[in-house]
Amino acid sequence: MSELWAAFSRALGLEVEGKDLTTMNMVLRAVVVFVASIVMLKIGDKRFMGKSTAFDVFLGIVFGSTVSRAITGNAPFFPALAGGLTLVLLHWVFAAVAFRSHGFGKLVKGDSRLLVKDGEIRWDEMRKAHITEHDLNEALRSAGLEPDVSRVKAAHLERNGDVSVIKYE
């Protein structure tokens, strides 16, 4: 068994510094990290890399940065993978708590903003959200409304950055 571990360790370059990794070490590390990351993401949830909130995107960036260090040797291999798993588990826990607590969900994921109400643009909310009239018009066109705000019952800037539009009947 120790011979098998020694061969695995040599193949991944676990005993050398990052600057001394060979191309083959990096390739094998990339394969192991890729497979391990897929397993970790399966532990998380399906929406993690979908079109979601800034909370989800942030995890994607930090997760990628953390596990990439295992490939490049900028951090010890297994601790870097453990760090990635910890981030995914934290995301899962935070999402579970946010499901049960609206206040925590707002804190972590943000809240939607009402941009249009009863055909009237709410300029204060547009300004706070940094949404231009051009952005709003794009959303109206996507909803099948030529930029005609008078036909809009409500338009919300959602937590994932999309603008949803509710038309008058």
Image (tube, rainbow, N blue to C red):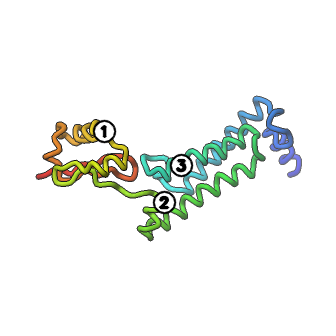
| Number of residues whose C-alpha sits closer than 10 Å to that of mark 3, classed few (under 14), some (14–19) or many (20 or more) | few
**N-terminal label among 3 and 2:** 3
In front of the other: 151 or 29: 151
Q: Residue 135 bears which disc, if any? A: 1
- Helix, strand or loop at mark 3: helix
Kindly identify the residue that appears in the image at 17 percent across and 37 percent down: 146
- What numbered label is drawn on residue 108? 2
Measure the C-alpha gap from mark 3 to mark 2: 11 Å
Residue type at mark 1? Answer: Asp
CA–CA distance in space, label 2 to label 1: 25 Å
**Residue 112 as seen in the image, left or right of residue 73:** left
Q: Secondary structure at mark 1?
A: helix
Type of the residue with mark 3: Phe
Asked whether the beta carbons under mark 3 and mark 1 sit within 8 Å of each other, the answer is no
Q: Nearer the viewer, residue 126 or 81?
A: 126
Residue 4: give x, y in percent of width and height.
84, 46
Q: CB under 8 Å between callouts 2 and 1? A: no
Q: Which is more N-terminal, label 1 or label 2?
A: 2
Q: Position of residue 63 (x, y in %)?
A: 61, 48
Question: Residue visible at 33% across and 54% down?
Answer: 113
Can you give x and y, in whole percent of width and height, for residue 21 in the image?
80, 33
Determine whether the residue tagged by mark 2 lies in a helix, strand or loop. Answer: helix
Residue 68 drawn at (x, y percent): 67, 41
Distance between the alpha carbons at the discs numbered 3 and 1: 23 Å
The residue nearer to you, when weighing 49 against 144, is 144
Q: Amino acid at mark 2?
A: Val
Which of the two residues, 122 or 57, is positioned nearer the viewer here?
122
Report the residue at 67% width, 39% height from top. Answer: 31
Residue 58 is marked as 3
